[in-house]
Amino acid sequence: MEPMAVNDQPVIRLDGVTKEYVKYEDTPTLLGHALRWNRTKRSTLVAISDLNLEVARGETVGVIGRNGSGKSTMLRMVAGVTAPTSGRTEINGRVAPLISVGVGFHPELTGRENVYVNGTILGLSRDQIDDRFDEIVGFAEIAPFIDTPVKFYSSGMFVRLGFSVAVAAQPDVLIIDEVLAVGDIAFQGKCFDRMEEMRQGGATVLVVSHNLNAIIRLCERTLVLDRGMTRFVGDTHDAVELYHRILAEDGPTDAGEGSAGGPSLAARLLGPDRRPVAKVEAGGELTVRVSVSGPPPSNNAHLGVHVNSATGVMVYSETVPFAPLAGPADSPAVLDIRFRTQMPSGSYKVKAVLVWGGEPHERAVSPVIDFYVDGRPMVHGLADFEAVFEVPAEIVSPPGPGSEDEAAVADATPDHRHDLGDVDQEHPRQRSQPAPQTGGAGLDQHPVTDPGQHGYQAEPPQR
Amino acid sequence: MRSPTHSFVLEGPRAPIRSLLRDLWSSRDLIIMLARKDYFVRYRRASLGLVWAVGLPFVQALVLSFVFSKVFRFETDVHYGVFVFSGILPWSLFAGSLGAASTSIVDNHMLASKIYFPRAVFPMVTVLTALFAVVPGVIVLLTMALVLGVSLDWTVVLIVPGLLLMVLLLVAFNLVTSALHVYFRDIRFVVAAALTAWMYATPVLYPLERAPGSLRTIIELNPVTGAVTMFRAPIGGTENLFPAVWWTLAWIAVLGTIGVIFQARRDRVFIDLL
């Protein structure tokens, strides 16, 4: 993909941008300031350090990093909300953030009123909103509810309307900060399509997400931030790879929980070769190595593993009675929990939980570890059943005369099984539908005979 | 589609004053829209709705005029109730907007952290929201005056420059207090405390000429006096307009300049403290 025309100036240009925040241990108070009470109680926090980035028109760039790595600070600087402490930000064009739920929308106002308020915030004039109103409502698919106060909307409807208004503002830079995770799959597909359209029209899109699927799908280039430092800018797959190396190196960032004086849990994520990993191919093997240190739990101890999706839905949990082998004192009891990742591509969180005692249970929880499953981008939902799509053997018949008709092929449904048989045997799907551009995300690794038959047409092209 | 007016270059926290003023001017649609939103949101769920917007100052005027005319036996040339209402209306515009404005940037931090427009938009919005409620109030005031036998002449038109003075004064004050409140969260309480005393230092319940000599100078220096007196001219007369109005204009110039400088210096870093 050509990045940009030769003489075109970049839309986003960050030159040696550093952002420091002054951290007050107490927020300054009038008296404190006047009397110089809390002069010494301030420290500096470097949120972004020497960031250099140029983004051309029509590029989609991802930003990934752990919480606190400086992603939001960077977005704020691109949005012009905050100025760099040193360095220079230059934005050539209008920036529209996808204003998330509860920010741009007022719950008491109707959808219609909120469209006008939000549109104005994004810089549209009243006439422009009038002109685009039907398009906004149509795209958001909320026409019947447009005069209902948005407090009655579902979170999906919120996001749809928000996205719809943001793209209607036709910004030069669209900022997508996590929010797309909320919409349903069908609408996400629509959003991806629309973003692709905008990109072709020259808009620049900046995506920040923990949903690495979305990043891989949307972004040709990705920036990896780690504690404010730029670790990498470049090919998205390399960026995701590096991000997982960072996750694996540093281990979990939170501390876990447990009662004082009780046992505490630590956990590591290991690959099949027993080396620390943070990414696994779909269907591959993962081991959670749990070590329980501190005083051994009393009676009725159970150890469990919880795997949650990036959106917080529990994917899997299993608990077994826990009776650690009596080892030498002071050394933690270690247990490996090994499982196969039969789930769709995406980011997941795993933690180990130890419960013991009677009612109420006491419990200790290991720090949460992030990991990423790669290689099955067409699978959605919580579990990967590794379904096989095939034409039943008894229906497959030899090709009949005149069955080369393209329209019939494109239109094939299970009711046209004779056509399906033809396509399957002689002409793979690609004849009537252009092949998706594969970009290494591992498309179609399962035995699909005819992807178009199973709703995959709705998917936007992969990169 | 390139929109050059939205392009920006930032090399430090300070925004040039000229670009701040230009951005503010181009945000005028936004100010109107946000003010309308606030206004409707405030009254939507109340069954009497907009009646409250006029009702509250009216009730306040009713109570105060009862207390002062019946208990303290206070009298004015015109009907005292009309006189008090004609002072309470501009005063409640001032007090309502100033109170809301000081916290406005902090209150809107969610929106402010996502998208840039001059942060001075928020204190401006509070002026407009408060102003919406004054317009029906003026109609009620004039009706009251006619019904209760207060004769009105050409000075009725002075209500408009009176409101204009008040709006400018509020803009100037609000720019300063909203910026200060981001740094010092005591400001809202300072403002609230000041407002209670301030009302009595403003000729709201009494005509300016009743104030004794030394106090009168202080009251004339009070920036709100000029605006209230101008607004009230059709009821209270035009004799006391000056020098109070000159003082009001001086305050507007000084505070407005300070406010714009504050806002320009901190516009793009306010959010770091929210």
Image (tube, rainbow, N blue to C red):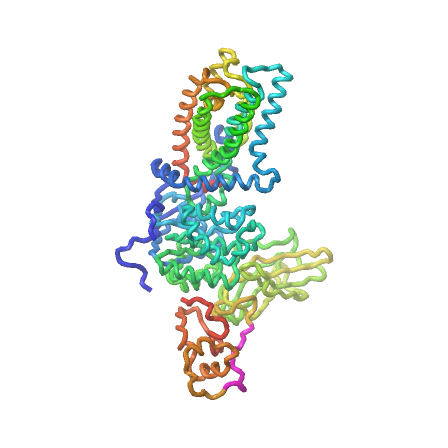
Q: Position of residue A274 (x, y in %)?
A: 52, 68
User: Residue A64: x and y, percent?
Assistant: 44, 57
* Image: B31 above or below A90: above
Q: Quadrant of residue A306?
A: bottom right
**Depth order, front residue of B143/A420:** B143
Residue drawn at x 66%, y 56% is A363
Horizontal side of A266 relative to A242 (left or right) equals right
Res A427 seen here: yes
Q: Residue at x 41, y 33 (%)?
A: B262
- Vertical relation: A393 (above or below) A69: below
Task: Give the residue at x 40% y 41%.
Answer: B27
Above or below: residue A455 compared with residue B52: below
| Residue reaching furthest to the top | B213
- Quarter containing the N terminus of chain A: bottom left
| Residue A83 in picture, x, y percent from top left | 39, 43
Q: Is residue A37 visible?
A: no
The x and y percentages for residue A237 are: 41, 64
Asked which quadrant contains residue B245, the reply is top left
Return the residue found at the far right.
A358
Residue A391 is inside the magenta segment: yes
A444 to A12, vertically: above or below: below
Q: Is residue A447 left or right of residue B21?
A: right
Q: Quadrant of the C terminus of chain A?
A: bottom left
Between A329 and B163, the residue placed more toward the observer is: B163
Asked whether B134 or A244 is in front, the reply is B134
* Main secondary structure type of the part rendered in magenta: loop
- Queried whether the magenta region covers residue A460, the answer comes back as no
How many labels sit on residues? 0
Magenta segment: A385-396
Q: Residue shown at 40%/77% (left/top)? A: A431
